[in-house]
Image (cartoon, coloured by chain):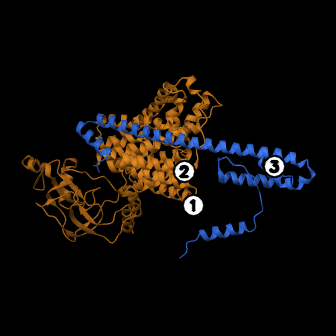
Chain colours: A orange, B blue
Amino acid sequence: MIDLLQQLFNNTGFGYLDWRMLFMWGVVGVLLYLAVNHKFEPLLLVPIAFGAMLANLPTQGIINKPASHLRSPISGEIIHAGLTEGMGVQLPFVERVMPDTVGQINPRNLERLIAGEMVDGFGRNTLTHIIRGNAYLEMTAEADIEVAGMRLLPTDRLVWADASGHVVSVERSVGMAVVDGGRLAELQSEHTGGLMHYIKLGVLLELFPPLIFLGVGALTDFGPLIANPRMLLLGAAAQFGVFATFFGAPFLGFTARESGAIGIIGGADGPTSIFLANTLAPELLAPIAVAAYSYMALVPVLQPPIMRLLTTSKERRIRMQRLRPVSRLEKLVFAVMVTVACILLVPAASPLIGMLMFGNFLRECGVTERLSKAAQNELINVVTIFLGISVGITMTGDRFLRLDTIGIMLLGVFAFLIATAAGVLMAKLMNLCSKQKINPLIGSAGVSAVPMAARVSQVEGQKADPTNFLLMHAMGPNVAGVIGTALVAGYFLTIFTR
Amino acid sequence: MSSFPLFIATTAEGAGSTGSIMIVGFLLVVVVLALLAAITSALGALFARQAAREAARAADFSRQAADSKAQAGQSASSPSAKAVSLTAADASAAVTGEPNPEDDPLLLSVIAAAIHSIAGDRAHRIVSIRASAEGWAQEGRRQIFSSHRIR
């Protein structure tokens, strides 16, 4: 009976818990508290937090990938191949980030893994190959790490199995050359992958952010922007926050690609942040998404001090000219014009701009009411659930609890504050050379965060003059910020992924 | 594709520094959005001119209607012309906003609101309200048929 109880206990998940998972439960608790109790972006934070909870539990059959071909991450020469046909591969129950290179792993653990032993947290037979990159082949004489009779370089690349199963074919052996993406072996399993794996493909294949943009376009009235096109300049100015952070991030040790992905947090646009991070820095996707949505939720706290600091009482009382009515035809022409112009100038922004304006066209054309309503409600709600939980599922303890995360949080708030300041200062600059005065408070709405940033402008404006209504005026820079952030994302993609 | 972004990317790579990527990127966004602002302003000016022309036409129409009402009032003083002028007087009453005493004001309000929801902010004036024979039934059938895909 004791044996049975012992066996039962061994089959529970308690044995897989570690301090990082427990710490992440605390993070999940904070996120749920902010979302439920304070209603901070609850539509996103609740799915993200719940996904994070699942990521930090020893789940089975929910996150795992289906077994398939194992591919080389670099071009080089194979110096160790640990798989043989029929061998079983078992991933650890809790997903973890495996070390990329020989220099990042404890040599004793490496030796045991090469010998095919079970090592805590690494599963069984998960280290499949060690590959020396082409750039390091001439340095073979300098290899000074001796493991299992092999002389290795710290830069030698470790290849890990990404799914459990058994090996059905080995396509490359020791001494053979391999190209980046080339097949190394094939694994087979009766399990076809967990639900979260397939949902997460929506992020990996970059489907969800454009679909969210479709819904945002269907929900957005571009009328205030069309009635006062100068507001586009405020949306452009606020993007300075993104670029200033991009410039500053390398000083904290981030690469240029990572800096671009982090900087976009200043655009205050969650889907765009996810879209860019997934391409430029997939390993930083979780902290970037959490930072972006957390700061978007904190817009009413972060922006007002900057707005008050940079404006005088007189400026905050400026009343703006009433906006002219915009006809339906004008809105349709605007949607088409923005799509064509932006895609011609920055083709990489097509998925976001194209879907944003498509959604808006559905809304404004007046003959696709059912499609417009579907985009505004069912579609955006379903995708929001999937997007949130996909991001949350990446928040495993060892991926999230790193110094990088603190750096990203700091840079994110910096990006937000600079973006706010740049928008306000641009409005003041425009007042110097224009007869029609702009209330500089609406400049802060140039960060996207639709419509919360516009609402903050309205609230701050009413504190200075309770009879002044800035909301519709602030919606102009607010939606201009969405277009601006999408352009910045396209620009970074153009620069870094050619 | 030999496009503008590729040119920028090449430039940035040449400069090879974060600073140049930052400056070029920010300028690109400002220039693109300024360009959009300029095009939108130009289009807005065209649409505003057209709207002004339509408003002027509506004002002319309103003035003509008022004139015709005045003429109808003068003709009505002659007993022989009274019957002939009745219809014109009704029409002009509608045009100038004076309700026909036989119309239900509540019904008029509902119809005016419905027309406004369709026409939006475009200048419009209700000049005639007549009962329609089987329009509602027809519209209902049309909506039912159009909501199903024929297989």
Secondary structure, mark 1, is helix
Local crowd size for mark 2, using a 10 Å CA cut-off: few (<14), some (14–19), many (≥20): many
- How far is the residue under mark 2 from the one under mark 3? 42 Å
Q: How far across and down, in percent of the image, does residue A143 sit?
A: 10, 48
Question: What label sits on residue B93 in the rendered view?
Answer: 3
Amino acid carrying label 2: it is Leu
Secondary structure category for the residue under label 2: helix
Quarter of the image where the N terminus of chain A is located: bottom left
Tag 3 secondary structure: helix
Give the labeled residue for mark 1: A370
Q: Position of residue A442 (x, y in %)?
A: 53, 34
Label 3 marks which chain's residue? B
Residue A23 in sight: no
Q: Amino acid at mark 1?
A: Arg
* Residue at horizontal 44 percent and vertical 46 percent from the top: A270
Q: Give the quarter of the image for residue A367.
A: bottom right
Spot occupied by residue A341 in the image (x, y as percentages of width and height): 41, 46
How far apart, in angstroms, are the residues tagged by discs 3 and 1? 40 Å
Quadrant hosting residue B16: top left
Horizontal side, residue A349 vs residue A212: left or right? left
- The residue under label 2 is A219
Label 3 or label 1, whichever lies nearer to me, is 3
Residue A232 is left or right of residue A114, and the answer is right
In this rendering, does residue A236 appear at all?
yes
